[in-house]
Amino acid sequence: MEQNDIMEKIVSLCKRRGFIFPGSQIYGGLSGTWDFGPLGVELKKNIKKSWWRALVYQRDDIVGLDTSIIMNPSVWEASGHIQGFSDLLVDCKECKKRFREDIVKQTCPECKGALTQSKQFNLMFKTFVGSVEDSTSTVYLRPETAQGIFVNFKNILTTSRKKLPFGIAQYGKAFRNEITIGNFIFRSREFEQMELEFFVQPGEAQRWHQYWIQERLLWYQRLGIKKEHLIVRQHEKKELAHYAKDCYDIEYFFPMGPSELEGIANRTDFDLRQHSKISGNDLSLLDEKTNTKFFPYVIEPSGGVDRALLAFLIDAYSEEIVRGEKRVVLRLHPSLAPVKVAILPLLRNRPDIVELAKNIKNIFPGNYYVVYDDTGSIGRLYRRQDEIGTPYCVTVDVQSLEDKKITVRDRDTMQQERIHIENLKEYLDKKLE
Ligand code: GAP
């Protein structure tokens, strides 16, 4: 399959099947915003759940946090975002469109008009708190979730009694007034991040940096992204963010070329030191051996939920010919699949079969998403479930009324197995564990 084709196919599948819609669509949309439909919201939640499980539940050295999107503006002064979080932009003198300097050549890419000198443009969205709209009430929508973690460093330390090395994990919305958006949800203005700030002894930072690059690579692979579709790229000095001493990107081979999925930075003690200085609250720790104060270093794996979602979809997408017909399958890892099980009656005009199928759906107590569907022939129902990545379909037929057995069909192998209804829940629970 051509690489460009695959993006088109994913965009179309996402719209058609209710994964992702353009934001505010009935008003003509708002560029750089997307709405996640019934299947998209499940996939997104499952990605965040898998991340949280790997970082918070399966380890003893990381705790979770959920902080405000709007913070005291001094946070962004201390973090360097007011001064340094900007892109160099140029304007077209003819059509007045604005572009990032690094993506244009001498003339406007749209109308070939002459371009202005470049100038800095801050990427943070501004708004106001309270009833007065002036500089004293200006606040920003957070451009990264990380700062909520740094300003709570001491709160977490005293309440969780963690000792170095330890981490704080948070996922949530972030906002950037990006000038160049595009490639579907790859770069938008409102998106979600999954960020871990891992605090270590300064002398151990390099070792932990390498450790987290490997851990994060393995996370993507365990959830189904093919190893050969991922690469790690070290930032050149000129690419480094203002707070980073060193950074590696995990890149995925997106259809438009290898692009950043997640950045893993060594932020040194930049943030804790800055917040101590600007807030007047000392965020340093005491080294009990030497009785001296020091600031821990921070290793930060920072990934985008939306980018991960796009990569998981692209990597899972496959087309094959089965008995002369095209079958589209999303081979999503079962823990990511939006719908885990679909219950399908073989004959939708037989009330006894429909009733049994609906009763079978009630066996499942809501631990994972199970749907009932009788809106088409069985062939069409299977095709629909394959296309959205449902790992198991359960079919109820005439024979089921007598022997109380149903057929479980595996999405990937298309193998079918006859299972007694009494054993069905345990059978699927085990498969989906
Ligand atoms: N706290 C560090 C930080 O924010 P970043 O590389 O600017 O680092 C981290 O962002 C991740 O957030 C990126 O790897 C990407 O997955 C995601 N991300 C950043 N900007 C984005 C955008 N405009 N749209 C979608 N995802 C974005």
Image (tube, grey):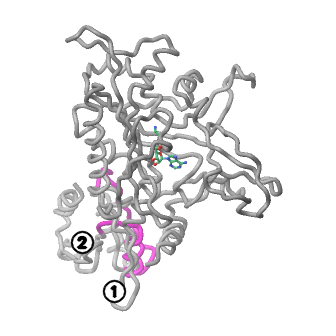
- Specify few, some or many for label 2: CA neighbours under 10 Å numbering under 14, 14-19, or 20 or more: many
Give the camera-side residue of 387 and 428. Answer: 387
Task: Residue at 48%, 57% (x, y): give it.
Answer: 38
Q: Can you tell which quarter of the image residue 194 is in?
A: top left
- Looking at the rendered structure, the kind of residue marked 2 is Val
Is residue 428 magenta-colored? no
Give the camera-side residue of 236 and 103. Answer: 236
Q: Quadrant of the N terminus?
A: bottom left
Q: Can you tell which quarter of the image residue 74 is in?
A: top right
Task: Residue at 38%, 52% (x, y): give it.
Answer: 233
119 above or below 412? above
Which comes before the other along the chain, label 2 or label 1? 1
Q: Is residue 53 left or right of residue 373?
A: left
Q: Which residue is mark 2?
A: 408
Q: Which residues fall within the magenta stretch?
A: 364-392
> How far separated are the C-alphas under marks 2 and 1?
19 Å
Residue 36, image x, y percentages: 52, 54
Residue furthest out toward the bottom:
324
- Specify few, some or many for label 1: CA neighbours under 10 Å numbering under 14, 14-19, or 20 or more: few
Task: Residue at 32%, 74% (x, y): give it.
Answer: 353
- Looking at the rendered structure, the kind of residue marked 1 is Val
Residue 311, image x, y percentages: 42, 60
Q: Quadrant of the C terminus?
A: bottom left
333 above or below 200? below
Q: Which residue is mark 1?
A: 322
